Amino acid sequence: MIQAQKIKDELNNNGFSNERLIIGCDLNDREDSDTYNIMLNNVFSMVDSGHAGICTLECYNNSKNPKIDFLFNCGTSIDATKSKVLQVDISDHRPVMAYILIYLIKKIKKDIFKSFL
């Protein structure tokens, strides 16, 4: 829980709270934990872009084990319908894959209405 708060504080203190962020992490904690809620809500808001309740820990032993690996994001869009936990048992955690759409929007500083005058 302390590390989650440190992550959020460091991101905020270094000016990343208003940037596009995608953070993949192993929280070693469940979706209903204080650690998880810190990542979502403390200092600045983030979104859990992965599927809820999908096993990522020791799934080969029990597919009802918890999801403890997460993709958090803010300021960008992740299509969670195309994100998934890969059914590969090569370690005690299964890999999480995300389909990320990045939209580039050019900001126009010129006042559009002035161009009509």
Image (cartoon, helix red, strand yellow):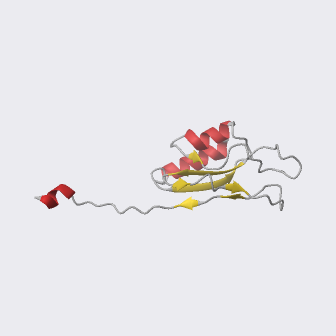
| Residue beneath the point at 57% across and 60% down | 100
Quadrant location, the N terminus: top right
Query: 99 or 21, which lies in front?
Result: 99
Residue at the front extreme, as displayed: 81
**Count of numbered marks:** 0
70 lies left or right of 113: right
Quadrant location, the C terminus: bottom left
72 lies left or right of 113: right
- How far across and down, in percent of the image, does residue 89 sit? 84, 59
- How far across and down, in percent of the image, does residue 90 sit? 83, 62
Give the quadrant of residue 87. bottom right
Residue at the left extreme, as displayed: 117
55 lies left or right of 116: right
- How far across and down, in percent of the image, does residue 5 sit? 60, 43
- How far across and down, in percent of the image, does residue 28 sit? 74, 46
| Residue beneath the point at 39% across and 61% down | 105
Residue at the right extreme, as displayed: 61
Query: 74 or 13, which lies in front?
Result: 74
Query: 60 or 72, which lies in front?
Result: 60
| Residue beneath the point at 53% across and 52% down | 11
